Image (cartoon, rainbow, N blue to C red):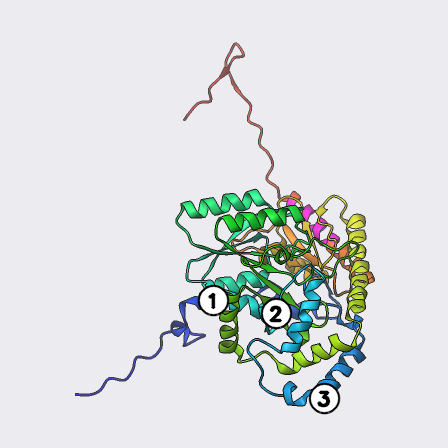
Amino acid sequence: MTERSPRAPQGTNLDPWYGSYAARTAGLAASEVRALFAVASRPEVVSLAGGMPFVSALPPELLADAALRAVRDHAGYALQYGSGQGMPRLREQILDVMALEGIRASADDVVVTTGSQHALELVAKLFLDPGDVVLAEGPSYVTAITVFTSFQGDVQHVAVDEEGLVPQALREAIASLRMAGRTIKFLYTVPSFHNPMGVTLDWRRRMEILEICRDNGILVVEDNPYGLLYFDQPPPQAMRSAEEDGIIYLGTFSKTLAPGLRVGWAVAPHAIREKLVLANEAAVLSPSSFSQTVISEYLDAADWRAQIDTFRGVYRERRDAMLAGLREHLPGLTWTVPAGGFYVWLTLPERLDSKAMLPRAVTELVAYTPGTAFFADGGGRQAMRLSFCYPSPDFIREGIRRLATVIHGESALVEEFRPARRTIAPNRGALGSVLPPSVG
C-alpha cells in the first residue's frame, strides 16, 4: 500500500499558509495611523496624523551622557539579561514619577514592559477569552482596539462627551451587556488628555466610574501616557491614586522622554502583578536592560522635571497654533480644546466622510487620522483626529489652511450632488378639499 503524502496547506494565491493561521489572527488589521506614516513622512506633507513626540526638544547630551554611564559604569547589568519584572532601581524611580499624579505604591507593585503598548498586550493575553467584552471610550486609542481584537475580544464603546467618559452611558452599557449574558472583563480608559479626543475626565466622574466598576466587579485599565503633559493646570490625580485593588495602571516614558527607548510599566494588584511578570517573561524574557539603565541614569542625573516642563511649553505653543488656525480657516466647525496632551478632535460638516476624504487631503499635502480608526464598530466617519505634537507652529497653521481647502472643496462637491428635494402638491378635489392620493 502506498503511503499518502501529507495534505498541502490550503491558502490563497498570495499566501499559501492562509488556512494555517490561528483564528485569532482575524483580529489583526493594519492600523490606519501606521499606514499613514509613509505618506506623512514625506517632507512636503504637513502631517497632523501621527502622535510622534517632538524629541528634538530633548537635549541630546542628556541621553548621550546617560548611555555612556550605562555602558561605562553598569555594563555588567546593562548588556545582560535582566529580571522579568524590571530593574529594581528603575522601579524605585518610577514611583517618583507616579507620585506627581498622587499614586502611592511600592517598587514591588511595578512591572517594567517594552513600552506601555506591550503592557496592554500582556493584559489582553491574561484576561481575554474569545468573545469577552472590553468596554472602552468611543472613540478609543486605535492600537488598544487592535490589541483587544487580536485576542478575540469584543470592544464595546461607551459614549464620551467634552468631560470624558459618560458615567450613565457606562451604567447602561453594563446593564445591557449583562442582560444579554455577555462577559465583561475590563474597562479600558485614557482619562487624562484622551487619545484621540483630547478631553479630560474630571475628578467627580473618575470617582463615579470607579464606583460603577467596583459595584459590578469590573477591572479598570487606566492608560496614562499624557498626564504630566498639561499646559496650564495639572489634570485630576490618577484614578489609581484612589483605588488600588481594582485598577491596572499603565505608564510610559515614550511621551515624557523618548519613544525609541521602548520602556513603559504597569502597576497592578499583587496577584495580577505576578501573572504580568510571568507573561512578560514568556513574551520577551526580560525588557531591555540597556534601555532601563539609560533611563535610570537619566532620571538620576538630569533635571527630568524641568525637561517635562520644557515639553509642556513646546506642545502648548503647537496646540495654540492649531486652535488659531481652526478659528481662522474653519470657524463654522466644532472641535475639542485640549488642556494637555497631543490631540484635537474635529467634527466635520454633515455628510462629509473623513476616511473617504483622506486621498484628497494627501493630494493637498496634508495628512490627518480619520475618526474611523478609533472605533471598533465603523463609527467616527464625521470626525478626525488632528495631532499638534510634531510639526512646527508655522507648519501646523499651513496644514490647517490646506485642510480647510479640502473640507470646503468636499463640502461644495457634496452640496452640488445633493438630491433636489421634491415638493409633492396635494391632490385636491373640485371643492378644494384635500383628497387622498390615488393608489394606482
Q: Are marks 2 and 1 in contact (CB under 8 Å)?
A: no
Residue drawn at x 77%, y 66% as measured from the top left: 308
Q: Residue furthest left?
A: 1
Q: CA distance from mark 2 to mark 3?
A: 25 Å
Residues in magenta, as a range: 404-414
Label at residue 73:
3
Closer to the camera: disc 1 or disc 3?
A: 3
Closer to the camera: disc 2 or disc 3?
A: 3
Residue drawn at x 44%, y 23% as measured from the top left: 438
Q: Are marks 2 and 3 in contact (CB under 8 Å)?
A: no
The quadrant of the image that shows the C terminus is top left
Residue 228, compared with residue 412, is above or below; it is: below
Q: Amino acid at mark 3?
A: Asp
Q: Amino acid at mark 2?
A: Trp
327 relative to 133 in the view: left or right: right
Residue drawn at x 70%, y 59% as measured from the top left: 101
Q: Are marks 1 and 3 in contact (CB under 8 Å)?
A: no
- The residue pinned by badge 2 equals 265
Residue 28 at least partly seen? no
